[in-house]
Structure formats: structure tokens, C-alpha cells
Image (spheres, grey):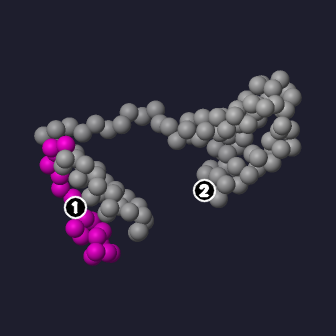
């Protein structure tokens, strides 16, 4: 059984994990409010019940998925025209590896691929 104190403790633990992962505090507050609201609605104000754990888990997953989802349509490559993709990130983040995997994926599909290195600080990145 989960009471309100346990729910608050659980949400505090989730919030601290998200904060340590550099998630914006506004999103964390939105997540907490959504979980509390759904839990209160489901239980009719009484936060004790066997299926409350499933409700909390599904609400957290649903809210995190909604935060990471985008309503923008993904870019579709056009054949016989130059399509430019730029990978940007910190050193050691795996850009070179990702670029070669990305290029290889499209080469297997029959696309002509060119990889250009624009890293001026690391000669090892030139492939």
C-alpha cells in the first residue's frame, strides 16, 4: 500500500534522479503534478491501493515519453540532391563512430555518401 507520504518520497527520489541528469526543473514539476493528479483521481483522494504502483509507473513513463516526443515531422532525404547532415557535440561523445554508422547505413540502401571532417583540433577524427 502506498500512502501520500510514500508517494511524495517516491516522487522526490524520481525528481532528484532527473535533476542529477540535468532535466529542467519545470519538466520535473510538471511530472510530479501529473503523477499526483492521476493518483488522486484514480484513488478518489485516498492514495492507498494495490494498482497505484502500476499507475505511478505508467504515468511516469507516459510523461517522460511526452517530454521527449516531438510534433515535428522527421526530415526525409531527397534522392539526386545533396542532403547535408551535421553532427555536433563534445569531444569523445561518439560523433565519428555515429557518422560512420550513419553513412554505412545509407550506403547499404544505395545512397552515395560523403563524410567530411571539420574538426580542427583533433587530427585523429579525419577518416
How many marks can you see?
Answer: 2
Would residue 72 be found to the left or right of residue 60 on screen? Answer: left
Residues 89 and 1: in front is 1
Residue 113 at x, y = what percent? 17, 52
- Viewport quadrant of the C terminus: bottom left
Would residue 82 be found to the left or right of residue 21 on screen? Answer: left
Q: Is residue 125 magenta?
A: yes
- Read off the residue under disc 1: 116
- Read off the residue under disc 2: 22
Would residue 103 be found to the left or right of residue 49 on screen? Answer: left
Residue at the image point whose x is 42% and y is 34% from the top? 72
Label 1 crowd (10 A; few <14 / some 14-19 / many >=20): few
Q: Can the viewer see residue 27?
A: yes
Tell whether label 1 touches label 2 (CB within 8 Å): no
Q: Is residue 42 above or below residue 82?
A: above
Residues 41 and 74: in front is 41
Distance between the alpha carbons at the discs numbered 2 and 1: 32 Å
Q: Is residue 19 above or below residue 110?
A: below
Which residues lie in the magenta part? Answer: 109-127
Amino acid at each position: 500500500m502506498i500512502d501520500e507520504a510514500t508517494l511524495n518520497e517516491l516522487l522526490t527520489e524520481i525528481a532528484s534522479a532527473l535533476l542529477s541528469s540535468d532535466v529542467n526543473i519545470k519538466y520535473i514539476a510538471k511530472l510530479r503534478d501529473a503523477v499526483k493528479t492521476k493518483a488522486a483521481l484514480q484513488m478518489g483522494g485516498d492514495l492507498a491501493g494495490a494498482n497505484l504502483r502500476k499507475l505511478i509507473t505508467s504515468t511516469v513513463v507516459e510523461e517522460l515519453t511526452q517530454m521527449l516526443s516531438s510534433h515535428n515531422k522527421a526530415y526525409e532525404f531527397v534522392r539526386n540532391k545533396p542532403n547535408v547532415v551535421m553532427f555536433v557535440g563534445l569531444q569523445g561523445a561518439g560523433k565519428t563512430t555515429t557518422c560512420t554508422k550513419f553513412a554505412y547505413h545509407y550506403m547499404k540502401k544505395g545512397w552515395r555518401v560523403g563524410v567530411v571532417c571539420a574538426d580542427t583540433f583533433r587530427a585523429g577524427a579525419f577518416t
